[in-house]
Amino acid sequence: MIERLRARLSGRSAGRGDQRGADFKRNFALGVANGVLYNNGLSFFNRTTIIPVFMASLGAPSILISLTALFESLGWHLPQLIASKYIVHKPRKMALYGWAAVIRVAGLLLATAAAFVAASSPGLALILFVLGYGIFSIAGGFAGLVFMEIVAKTCPKERRGSYFGLRAIFSGLVGLYLGVNVIKPVFANWGFPYTFMIAFGAGTLLIAGSFYLFTRQREPVQDDLPLERSMRAQFSTALALLAANRPFRRFVLFRGLMMLWFAGIPYYMLFARERLGASEVEMGTFISWEFGGLIVANLLWSYLSNNLGNRILLIVACALGVLVSAAVLGYAIGLFGLPAWTFGAIFFASAAVDSGVGTGGINYALEIIPDGERPTYIGLMNTLLAMALGLAAIAGGLRDLIGYTGLYVMTGGVALMALGMIIRLPEPRRAVRVMSV
């Protein structure tokens, strides 16, 4: 017993020493700064506000609005199983992130060009935006898998809650300032399409800066890796791992259900404008509400992730998702009769759910997945989740048939199912503690 206790204390001390190292501090700071710039850059391509309004102004149908609003999430997930083939055997993986960053910035420049031709050629603008934003999003899948690897290799699990929490909190603080002092005045004082020229240009600059900062991290060399495989062998290995790991399968199903919950997100802004009569100024304010949700929620998410575990975090976030859908449904059926500005609470809570499921989902996955095959597991999971996002886009497109009431009844139902699923999943850290005693 004494030897086991000494080993556990020794392990903890070593972990703390690593955390105080120069590389850890540098990587942690650059990772947080990367998140702040990226999240705020992406706010200028906001999927719940700016993208739906821009595309609706161009005459896009609901199904295309729904699909494009989910592009960033869809593209981040879809190619990752393919990407895993190219990095699972590599001791260092940052080079792929750099190439993907160049392609992503090129895609954003193309999407920004859409705003400059929107007034004269709305059809061409729609094509340019969907194409450019699609390129940005698909290349994000390759960058995203490297991002997960760098986080897993450079940040201990007891600090990942702080890592993602600080990214979100500082993003929220900067986003509140931008929402009040930049985005809101732009929407209030500039007309179409100038609002989108400014928004897309600013977003592209911030995102490009975020990519540069991330590539400045010092990536540790990894050993004990599998040999290089063919694409067919990589797919076969991934399916074999899925079949052999029941907790992983159930976790993927949980994440898939929460992806379906996202079907209602792109329509919050349109609902507020069409059903509640929200003004342009109020719509700009809703973005600030979103960042407020990020700030407040991530104080809680960081504590839960670091100290109690990511399963608890996901349970709380999922339960909040049920309440959000129920609240929007209340607005849709006229239960509340509240003014449009109160709908900001939906953006606040929805941002909290989105952040909680993202932070908890990443960290929970990294805790239950073995190191050597981590890119294969993550790549498979995210490619499967892309299919769920595709279903979410289709479900969102059904708004024209089932209305807002049907849409938010559906999202509330899948959130309830997801809540039941995550409650039954194990807590990885409890298993580790039991094995250590």
Image (cartoon, rainbow, N blue to C red):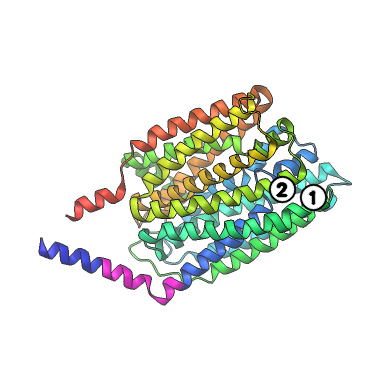
**Mark 1 near mark 2, Cβ–Cβ under 8 Å?**
yes
Residue that label 1 marks: 188
* Residues drawn in magenta: 12-25
Mark 1 or 2, nearer chain start: 1
Residue that label 2 marks: 284
**Residue 377 location (% of width, % of height):** 40, 49
Classified by dominant secondary structure, the portion drawn in magenta counts as helix
Rate crowding at label 1 as few (under 14), some (14 to 19) or many (20 or more) other CA atoms within 10 Å.
some
Q: For the point 83% across and 43% down, which residue is it? A: 122
**Residue 77 location (% of width, % of height):** 53, 47
Q: Is residue 352 magenta?
A: no
Q: Is residue 19 magenta?
A: yes
Q: Quadrant of the C terminus?
A: bottom left
Q: Is residue 423 visible?
A: yes
* Secondary structure state at the residue bearing disc 1: helix
Q: Nearer the viewer, residue 7 or 78?
A: 7
Q: For the point 31% across and 45% down, which residue is it? A: 427
Q: Nearer the viewer, residue 62 or 177?
A: 177
**Looking at the picture, which amino acid does disc 2 mark?**
Gly
* Secondary structure state at the residue bearing disc 2: helix
In the image, taking residue 145 as reference, residue 432 lies left or right, namely left
Residues at marks 1 and 2, CA–CA distance in whole angstroms:
8 Å
